[in-house]
Image (cartoon, rainbow, N blue to C red):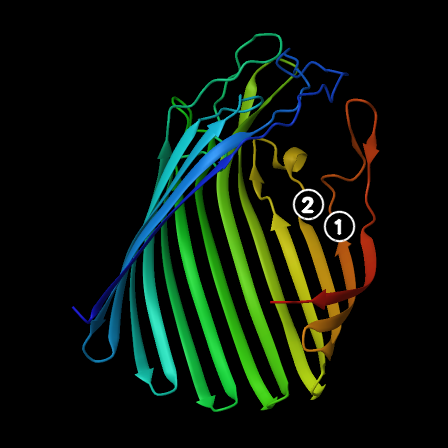
Amino acid sequence: MPQLSVLANIRFEDRDDKTPMRLYNPARRVDLDGNYWGGFNNPRSFSTLTSKVEANYTLPMNFRLIGSIDYEHWERRWQPTFVSYRAKTNEIFYRMEMRRTLADTLTGSIAYIHSDRSGSPFISTLSASGAPNPNVIAPLNLSDRNRDKVRLSLNWEPIEPLSLQVMIDESFDDYGHSSGSSLGLRKGSARNYSLDAAYAISENLQTIAWFSRNEIHIDQASRNRIPVDGSREIWSANLQNIGTSFGVDINGKPIEKLELGVSLSQSFITDKFTQKTSDPALYSIPDIATELSNLNLFARYALRKNFTLHLDYIFNRFKTNEWTWNHWTYNDGTRLSQDTKQIVNFVGLSAQYTWQ
């Protein structure tokens, strides 16, 4: 069938972590439940198996139908420590996509992706004192999860030197819980919007401008132990991570052997917690705002066909009101703090030599 093409692949990886176990936290403190922890590092060995089958079928009127099934298997070979744990997880992805050439200069596609993740039974952990832990919260990367995603993309070339790309996707997550518990991750969603524009001023001078917006929402529940009476208060949080970024790249080749480029980007990131407790005034915490500014300059000069010199300059500016790690104190008394404004300058010179 000339209209049909099929692609299949499989990949296996095995990692054997031989890191020696050492006591890194000798000052073991008792937690709120009266347990203490061993303080040893935990080497992590694992194996993964990923596979994919994809079929493309050409339909009339310039339509192309694409369907695929992806499978991912993780097997972890280490002992659980602080949180509940499962040795195996399996996730399967189903994708259905329709593409079409809408005009000589316009193409588009729409896709729907559904995935299911499950795994082996959760293993309860024990503290160093031998007492069992509640294990009522399943970790993010091990939780059962159902995800539905819709993705739309458009590519348009209105004139020969200009091309525009628009990408929009939105996903919804539904998480499972540990047996007998309603705590942990409950629901989540993500939205991503991006716009890219490329313009070729000449054969030796190109520009790219881009804009992106990312919104991540996670609804979760947990509980805190109240030392006064030993009870546990359940609280919830609607975590939000919102990022807006934009930038521009200019690449040019003024002479045959010299290539120059500049890249500018700016990002604004906000983290919101939106907690709900019995006493909002007591437990409410402020948002975190982060700003990132980047400037990259580069020059490449070909001394010979197989020998090139690279000169790079990078300027990075970081600004935040991050408070979660500010004045943090470890068990041994070590304190951690950070500057709310940081500037990094980097200059690098390298050479590349190739031979055949």
> Which residue is tagged 2?
286
Rendered location of residue 247, percent (x, y): 64, 72
Quadrant in the picture for residue 330: top right
Image quarter (top left, top right, bottom left or bottom right) of the N terminus:
bottom left
Image quarter (top left, top right, bottom left or bottom right) of the C terminus:
bottom right
- Left or right: residue 327 versus residue 265 is right
Find the distance from the CA under tag 2 to the CA under tag 1.
Answer: 10 Å
Q: Residue furthest left?
A: 1
Q: Residue furthest front?
A: 356
Label 1 crowd (10 A; few <14 / some 14-19 / many >=20): some
- Residue under the point 50% across and 44% down: 218
Q: Secondary structure at mark 1?
A: loop
- Residue under the point 62% across and 50% down: 271
Rendered location of residue 46, percent (x, y): 49, 32
> Which residue is tagged 1?
321
Seen from the viewer's position, the closer of residues 304 and 173 is: 304
Seen from the viewer's position, the closer of residues 3 and 149 is: 3
Does 293 sit above or below residue 198? above
Q: Secondary structure at mark 2?
A: loop
Does 157 sit above or below residue 23? below
Evaluate if marks 2 and 1 touch, with contact meaning CB atoms under 8 Å apart. Answer: yes
- Left or right: residue 186 versus residue 162 is left
Q: Is residue 31 visible?
A: yes
Rendered location of residue 69, percent (x, y): 30, 51
Does 284 sit above or below residue 268? above
Q: Amino acid at mark 1?
A: Asn
Label 2 crowd (10 A; few <14 / some 14-19 / many >=20): few
Q: Amino acid at mark 2?
A: Pro
Callout in the foreground (2, 1): 1
Sequence order check, earlier mark of 2 and 1 = 2
